Amino acid sequence: MNMTSGQIWLIITFLALGSFLIRFSFLGLIGNRPLPPWILRHLRYTPVAVLPGLVAPLVLWPQASGGQPDPARLAAAFTALAIGHFSKNVLAAIIGGAITLFAGLWLQG
């Protein structure tokens, strides 16, 4: 499908406008009012939902191994999950997972 530069810019413009309106509807229209407690309760889980969504594809289908899961990345993910669960410390989980990943990649050669 061949598109002209005008069509591409029109699509970019509509996507930018849509993105702005979504953000403005939340921040601009109700940004200066207190939110109901049930919305605040649900918003607390946003980072917990986003982080696994960003990390899971990198663990299960890594580009570095041609899309095949490898033991080093799986071990690093499980180590970070275990450290985070037991210590409740995000930084410790990240460091523990990184150390496990580098050690696993070093052992694999």
Image (cartoon, rainbow, N blue to C red):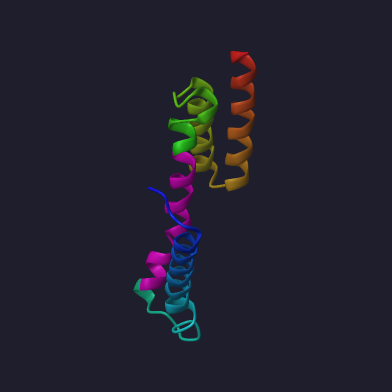
* Foreground pick, 27 / 32: 27
Residue 93 on the magenta segment: no
Which image quarter: residue 100?
Answer: top right
* Image location of residue 93, percent across then percent down: 57, 40
- Spot the residue most to the left: 38
* Foreground pick, 42 / 84: 42
* Foreground pick, 51 / 19: 19
Q: Residue at x 63, y 22 (%)?
A: 103
Quadrant that contains the C terminus:
top right
**Residue 22 vertical position relative to residue 69 in the rendered view, above or below:** below
* Image location of residue 27, percent across then percent down: 49, 78
* Foreground pick, 59 / 1: 1
* Image location of residue 95, percent across then percent down: 64, 37
Q: Residue at x 50, y 33 (%)?
A: 77
* Image location of residue 72, percent across then percent down: 54, 23
Q: Residue at x 49, y 82 (%)?
A: 28
**Residue 15 vertical position relative to residue 57 in the rendered view, above or below:** below
Q: Residue at x 52, y 42 (%)?
A: 84
**Residue 52 vertical position relative to residue 59 in the rendered view, above or below:** below
Q: Tell how many labels.
A: 0
The secondary structure that dominates the magenta segment is helix
What is the magenta range?
A: 39-56
